[in-house]
């Protein structure tokens, strides 16, 4: 790998502290960051356990992933304030791998996934996230909000029944009667506390205050409600170094590579979109390539310490940001608190009512969903409205990566179609009797047919001029179209001249094997030349 690339990236891989409104990390800021991290860690526990069940692995595999991925990305990630951990988007891809080949192959896949993400970061492929249009972002946010909401519904099932039904969010027995009423009541009370707390005090994050009060209500009243411990025990030791026990051969690579590639793509897409979303909320830009490397390093390490891998979590990131977390300290605190829960505080954490955590996540859903998009749908072009709805639906029914790819493809096709319809020409006769076609609009694969229909070779005079001052020749299809028109005039013994070709078009024509004559005074920003085509030959001169 070129040393310059590594050196350049090493200079970018910094760990800056980004503070709120320029404040330093004084006592007040440190308290806010730590409390935000504590709040996030409490919300991480049931999510990690649930996603471990989805993937078909032990809960500690999910918890270790949340700890390791969360800690490493908090330290070297591209966006302070973001939270990463085990996610459902990755878990659903892992199901068939674990079922067919076992957990050791999952660990090997996570390592390879991390390596692929590091490669993406080193070569700065993360910059391509800027190609995601805003309608796709809105659909992504709305779809993910719905997914977070649906993921919480499993907590309204009888404890243990969902897991017994097959590691999914559905299939368990639903709560009914008094247990359901208590669950709904506590969820509603949690949401009300979160809404009221900022109006009374900002000394403690609203979600943390709500969790603490709900725990107090349940313990004082002795309510029998589902708790974190009903999902699984989270007690364990430190993650141990463990190389995946798989054969090191091409057959293993053949098995794990497709999964690793899909997981790497999903993880990076979700992480980079979350990076942009958090950046919009906090008003700070993040480093896409740095985030790719951070996610890759985190997953590579996770794979050799018995974790299921992970990526950025939009729900927990929103909790952190809304709780005041703005620096790397909040993410580090969340990871360390989670490890402390596993090592020392499992008996306490297991007593937290699931209703409190569901209420917190429901408030995240309300805050995440782009409600303004419902009114925007009536004002934006029909294509953009369709993309918003399409990405939302595909995110819910399939997965994030598929939804984003589909949204980008549809947006690109719509853009190409709209530009294809813009091609036209203004025609007039010059003083010397030549017919001038002043081409308007971009010439590319989508507009080639319309371009060809502009000309009437049989009716035109002996000299025809194509003026591209107001156009742009974009690709090989455009060049072929120009050659085709030139051939038609050539067959009729007529001359065609090409004028005002841009510098990039000049390069394209050269690459296509056209006879191009450069001149010393050709400008860098634009080439203004006449190319005359007569009986198969091209000659160049200045216009």
Image (cartoon, rainbow, N blue to C red):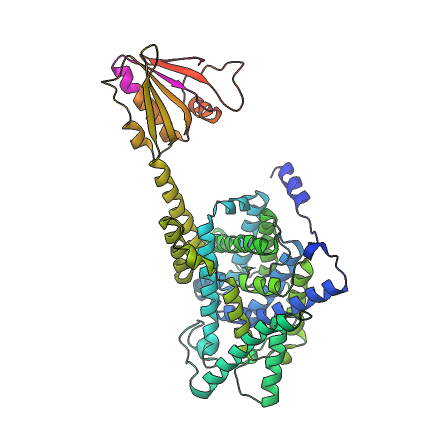
Tell me where the magenta segment starts and ends, as one range: 487-502
Report if residue 243 is visible in the image. no
Q: Is residue 494 magenta?
A: yes
Q: Is residue 191 magenta?
A: no
Q: Nearer the viewer, residue 240 or 33?
A: 33
What residue is rendered at 45% in x and 22% in y? 506
In this rendering, the answer to whether 395 lies above or below 349 is above
What residue is rendered at 54% in x and 64% in y? 315
* Residue 228 appears left or right of 422: right
The image shows residue 325 at horizontal and vertical percentages of 65, 62
Report if residue 224 is visible in the image. yes
The image shows residue 168 at horizontal and vertical percentages of 44, 71
What residue is rendered at 33% in x and 36% in y? 421
* Residue 54 appears left or right of 41: left
Q: Nearer the viewer, residue 208 or 203?
A: 203
Quarter of the image that includes the C terminus:
top left
> Which residue is most to the top?
432
> Which residue is most to the left?
458
Quarter of the image that includes the N terminus:
top right
In this rendering, the answer to whether 135 lies above or below 541 is below
The image shows residue 132 at horizontal and vertical percentages of 47, 48
In this rendering, the answer to whether 496 lies above or below 93 is above
Q: Quadrant of residue 244?
A: bottom right
Q: Nearer the viewer, residue 39 or 77?
A: 39
State how many labels appear.
0
The image shows residue 487 at horizontal and vertical percentages of 29, 19
């Amino acid at each position: 790998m070129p040393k310059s690339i590594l050196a350049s990236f090493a200079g970018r891989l910094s760990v800056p502290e980004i503070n709120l409104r320029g404040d330093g990390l004084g006592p007040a800021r440190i308290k806010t960051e730590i409390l935000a991290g504590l709040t996030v860690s409490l919300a991480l526990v049931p999510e990690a356990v649930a996603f471990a069940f989805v993937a078909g692995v032990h809960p500690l595999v999910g918890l270790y992933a949340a700890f390791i991925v969360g800690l490493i990305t908090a330290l070297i990630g591209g966006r302070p304030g973001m939270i990463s951990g085990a996610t459902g988007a990755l878990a659903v891809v892992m199901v068939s791998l674990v079922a067919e080949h076992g957990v050791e192959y999952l660990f090997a896949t996570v390592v390879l996934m991390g390596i692929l993400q590091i490669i993406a970061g080193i070569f700065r492929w993360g910059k391509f996230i800027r190609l995601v249009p805003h309608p796709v972002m809105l659909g992504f946010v709305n779809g993910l909000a719905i997914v977070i909401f649906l993921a919480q519904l499993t907590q309204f099932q009888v404890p243990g029944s969902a897991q017994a039904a097959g590691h999914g969010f559905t299939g368990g027995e639903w709560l009914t009667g008094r247990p359901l009423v208590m669950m709904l009541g506590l969820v509603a009370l949690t949401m009300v506390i979160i809404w009221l707390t900022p109006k009374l005090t900002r000394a403690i994050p609203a979600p943390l205050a709500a969790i603490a009060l709900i725990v107090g209500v349940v313990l004082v009243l002795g309510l029998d409600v589902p708790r974190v411990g009903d999902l699984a025990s989270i007690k364990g030791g430190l993650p141990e170094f463990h190389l995946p026990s798989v054969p090191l051969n091409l057959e293993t690579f053949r098995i794990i590579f497709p999964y690793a590639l899909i997981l790497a793509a999903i993880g990076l897409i979700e992480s980079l979109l979350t990076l942009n979303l958090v950046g919009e909320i906090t008003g700070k830009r993040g480093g896409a390539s740095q985030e790719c490397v951070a996610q890759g390093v985190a997953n590579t390490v996770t794979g050799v310490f018995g974790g299921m891998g992970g990526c950025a979590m939009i729900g927990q990131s929103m909790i952190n940001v809304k709780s005041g977390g703005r620096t790397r300290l909040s993410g580090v605190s969340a990871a360390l608190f989670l490890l402390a829960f596993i090592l020392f505080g499992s008996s306490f954490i297991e007593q937290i009512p699931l209703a409190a955590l569901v209420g917190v996540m429901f408030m995240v859903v309300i805050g995440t969903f782009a409600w303004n998009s419902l009114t925007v749908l009536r004002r934006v072009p029909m294509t953009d409205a369709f993309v918003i709805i399409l990405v939302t639906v595909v995110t819910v029914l399939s997965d994030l990566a598929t939804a984003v790819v589909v949204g980008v493809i549809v947006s690109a096709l719509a853009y190409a179609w709209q530009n294809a319809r813009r091609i036209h020409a203004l025609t007039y006769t010059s003083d010397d009797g030549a017919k001038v076609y002043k081409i308007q609009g971009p010439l590319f694969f989508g507009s080639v047919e319309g371009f060809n229909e502009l000309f009437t070779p049989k009716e035109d005079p002996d000299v025809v001029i194509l003026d591209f001052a107001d156009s742009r020749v974009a690709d090989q299809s455009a060049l072929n179209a120009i050659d085709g028109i030139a051939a038609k005039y050539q067959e009729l013994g007529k001359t065609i001249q090409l004028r005002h070709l841009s510098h990039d078009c000049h390069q394209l024509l050269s690459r296509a094997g056209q006879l191009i004559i450069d001149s010393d005074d050709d400008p860098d920003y634009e080439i203004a030349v006449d190319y005359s085509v007569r009986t198969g030959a091209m000659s160049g001169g200045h216009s």
